[in-house]
Amino acid sequence: MEISHFWNKKTEIGYFFHFGKDTHNWTNVVQTIFDSSFATAAKMIYSHRSQEKKLIANYHTHTIRCNHAQGTEEEYIERAIDIGLKVLGFSDHVPQPYPAGYTSNIRMGMNELPEYVSTLLSLREKYKGKIDILIGFEVEYTRAYFDTLMAELRKYPVDYLIQGQHFVPDEVNGRYVGFKTDDEENLKNYVDFTIEGMRTGVFTYLAHPDLINYKGDDETFQRHMKRIVEASLELSIPLEINMYGFLDRRNYPCDRFFKMASDMGASFVIGCDAHRPDFLRQPDKISEFMDFLTRNGIKPGDNVIELRDWRTVKR
Ligand SMILES: [Zn+2]
Ligand SMILES: [Zn+2]
């Protein structure tokens, strides 16, 4: 049995107990703990908390297939082991079933999907006992292509999906969310669409929730973005603090979002969003990042989260 937690300022912490492949949340396992040994469980919590500044998991990792990342999978894995990770989840940009004639240059093609999965499956075997390799995808929710995509992904042993809403409503007909805007309508559409995606029930967490590059005032920004935090609380979807965006000095992660989310009692997960092996880093080695967390009332944990069973969701 392994105990893990992610962070929550209000409740201090949310624990999950992993029994092999099955996961149970705190309330489900309280009886189990009493039945086994509460003393043992408490000690394990303590040992995790005593080193709580170190991540042992990262679920946001890319591969060269997306055309804007570098390094081999083994270089990412070796780097992850070097910095002390026990779990490395690959979540490359998902291939999308776009219409014939439209080619995306920021993701793998549908024809690369089997090889992505088989490569990671064989690396999982190779590194067994050293690090757990998970197979995931970073997925945009769309209205036009989502059901087709889910049906395709179900053919493969994909462990989890994270939502990364880079486009509204989609890449073919939409707008890139990271472009600067002072139009409240763009902000509102991003929030509405992101929540629609969260409600599909397939996503383990929401990557860079504050990707929207809204240049307007804080009050307007927070009035809309608050709804994403409310949805994350209602649906138990942790919000990602994106380390790549921070190191690249992008508009995300931003204080005006994470201060609000933290005050509202949201749960968080750090995502390295590694597009290069050396982007896998421990936050406590980056003092500015630690300052960001501290001033927003967020404490680092081991970063292990419960994976959502996306396969059983009817879509
Ligand atoms: Zn990317
Ligand atoms: Zn990413």
Image: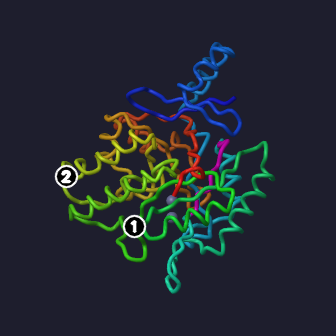
Q: Please provide percent x and percent y for residue 86.
A: 67, 42
For disc 1, does the CB lie below 8 Å from ligand 1?
no
Residue drawn at (34%, 40%) of the image: 261
In the depicted structure, whether residue 298 falls above or below residue 162: above
Whether the magenta-drawn stretch holds residue 282 is answered as no
The answer to which of 36 and 15 lies nearer the viewer is 36
**Mark 1: which amino acid?**
Phe
Q: Quadrant of the N terminus?
A: top right
Q: Please provide percent x and percent y for residue 133.
A: 69, 50
Q: Which residue is mark 2?
A: 220
| Mark 1 secondary-structure assignment | strand
Give the residues drawn in magenta, as a range: 85-92
The answer to which of 281 and 265 lies nearer the viewer is 265
Q: Which residue is mark 1?
A: 167
Closer to the chain start, of discs 2 and 1, is 1
In the depicted structure, whether residue 35 falls above or below residue 50: above
Q: Which mark, residue 262?
A: none
Most distant residue in the front direction = 314
Distance between mark 2 and mark 1 Cα atoms = 21 Å
